[in-house]
Image (cartoon, rainbow, N blue to C red):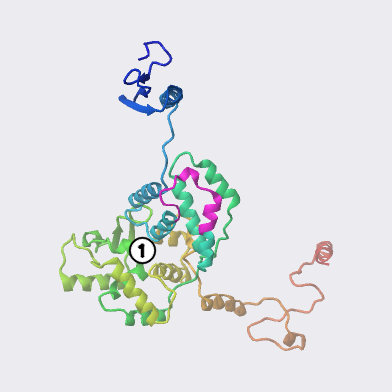
């Protein structure tokens, strides 16, 4: 056996004179023995094992970062932030997990990501859907440290066109009546409240009777999408609907106003939409209807933002839409005023109803001055 201080200290012939050589080394506090064919092989193995031990001592090895675990951590954090409302992102997260599995996230390449996006295009997914998938992937990768290089390559090399998701979807009074008739009576009240308060489905399903202030006509939303509470005014129609429910059930203050299952509500609502011939239309589009009707009644942006809980005019513009009839009525109002323009009838000397004729003074419209210098200057600029 080699002596202490000898470079071959961990090389042992056992039993002595047998020609069988072993390497004896301590790894992570445990004694390990390795059988070798000869002394030369034992020396080489001993040197390599000692070098690896020193490398692990002074240089911490990077642990692999399985993509599946990274996606799971991201989903859990989103659930905590949004109070369990990850929504459609669950399917998108699963799409990337299926593609990458337990692969180390640090080894992902742009080519792999492009392959997934190509498969989405082959499935004829819309540009907005593909863009959202890529956004979710970047959010997952942003959740970990050490992936900045990959994220930079994704931003530079992968360009996905954004689709126009600002769809104009709201109900006219006639469409609202048709939809209500195709809904079971159990689900009609929540639709009425959604249209008249602008509250989201998730918000309404969590409101309790204790959140109503009948004296002020206010409903408190304690868990909004932004994580903040807000108060929604209740008009007379909503108060009548809620009062009727309360009279029929006699609930306690801690009971939910709408004890409905979200999945059943969505399925029933979608079925009624199809039967009403309104597809595509979602429950969330009732919020569009709320904002659009207020806008067409003349509510200003500050009022709309306060009632709907929108933080910026840009977000409000996605919800408040004006109907073609309302826009036509706006421009039709110009016919009641004198526009100062000539038509073919006026050139023949006929007067158009509602339009005042222009005096033929030889001057362009708008020039009415007795100062000859000012008149010459105005004519010069108009010519």
- Whether residue 317 is visible: no
- Whether residue 242 is visible: yes
Q: Please say whether residue 103 is one of the residues in the magenta stretch.
A: yes
In the displayed structure image, the side of residue 39 where residue 30 appears, left or right: left
Question: What residue is shown at x 49% (from left), y 71% (from top)?
Answer: 168
Q: Please say whether residue 63 is one of the residues in the magenta stretch.
A: no
Question: What residue is shown at x 41% (from left), y 54% (from top)?
Answer: 97
Residue 84 location, quadrant: bottom left
Q: Quadrant of the C terminus?
A: bottom right
In the displayed structure image, the side of residue 365 where residue 151 appears, left or right: left
The one nearer the camera, 285 or 334, is 285
Majority SS type along the magenta span: helix
Residue 260 location, quadrant: bottom left
In the displayed structure image, the side of residue 19 where residue 219 appears, left or right: left
Q: Where does residue 288 sit, x and y in percent of width and height?
A: 43, 68
In this view, which residue lies farthest toward the front? 18
Helix, strand or loop at label 1? It is loop
Q: Where does residue 287 sit, x and y in percent of width and height?
A: 40, 67
Residue, disc 1: 200
When the figure is inspected, residue 241 is found, relative to residue 131, above or below; the finding is: below
The magenta-colored residue range is 99-116
Q: Where does residue 10 sit, x and y in percent of width and height?
A: 37, 19
The one nearer the camera, 140 or 13, is 13
Q: Quadrant of the N terminus?
A: top left
When the figure is inspected, residue 220 is found, relative to residue 270, above or below; the finding is: above
The one nearer the camera, 158 or 254, is 158
Q: Where does residue 205 sit, x and y in percent of width and height?
A: 28, 64
């Amino acid at each position: 056996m080699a002596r202490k201080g000898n470079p071959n200290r961990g090389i042992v012939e056992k039993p002595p004179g047998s020609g069988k050589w072993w390497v004896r080394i301590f790894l992570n506090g445990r004694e390990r023995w390795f059988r070798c064919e000869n002394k030369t092989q034992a020396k080489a193995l001993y040197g390599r094992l000692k070098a690896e031990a020193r490398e692990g001592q002074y240089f911490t090895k990077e642990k692999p970062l399985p993509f599946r675990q990274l996606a799971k951590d991201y989903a859990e954090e989103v659930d905590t932030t949004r109070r369990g409302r990850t929504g459609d992102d669950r399917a998108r997260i699963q799409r990337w997990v299926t593609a990458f599995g337990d692969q180390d996230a640090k080894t992902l390449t742009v080519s792999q990501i492009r392959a997934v996006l190509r498969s989405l295009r082959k499935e004829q997914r819309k540009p907005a859907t593909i863009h959202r998938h890529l956004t979710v992937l970047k959010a997952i990768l942003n959740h970990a440290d050490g992936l900045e290089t990959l994220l930079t390559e994704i931003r530079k090399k992968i360009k996905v066109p954004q689709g126009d998701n600002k769809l104009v979807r709201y109900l006219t009074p006639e469409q609202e009546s048709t939809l209500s008739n195709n809904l079971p009576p159990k689900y009609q009240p929540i639709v009425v409240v959604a249209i008249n308060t602008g509250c989201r489905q998730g918000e309404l399903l969590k409101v309790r009777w204790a959140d109503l202030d009948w004296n002020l006509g206010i409903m408190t939303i304690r868990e909004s999408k932004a994580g903040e509470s807000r108060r929604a005014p209740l008009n007379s129609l909503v108060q009548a609907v809620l009062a009727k429910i309360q009279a029929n059930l006699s609930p306690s203050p801690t009971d939910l106003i709408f004890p409905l299952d979200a999945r059943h509500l969505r399925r029933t609502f979608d079925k009624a939409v199809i039967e009403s011939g309104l597809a595509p239309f979602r429950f969330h589009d009732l919020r569009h209807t709320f904002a659009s009707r207020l806008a067409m009644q003349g509510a200003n942006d500050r009022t709309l933002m306060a009632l709907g809980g929108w933080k910026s005019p840009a977000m409000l513009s996605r919800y408040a839409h004006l109907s073609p009839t309302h826009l036509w009525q706006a421009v039709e109002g110009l016919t009641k005023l004198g526009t100062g323009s000539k038509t073919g009838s006026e050139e023949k000397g006929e007067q158009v109803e509602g339009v005042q004729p222009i005096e033929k003074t030889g001057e362009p419209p708008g020039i009415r001055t007795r100062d000859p210098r000012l008149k010459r200057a105005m004519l010069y600029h108009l010519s």
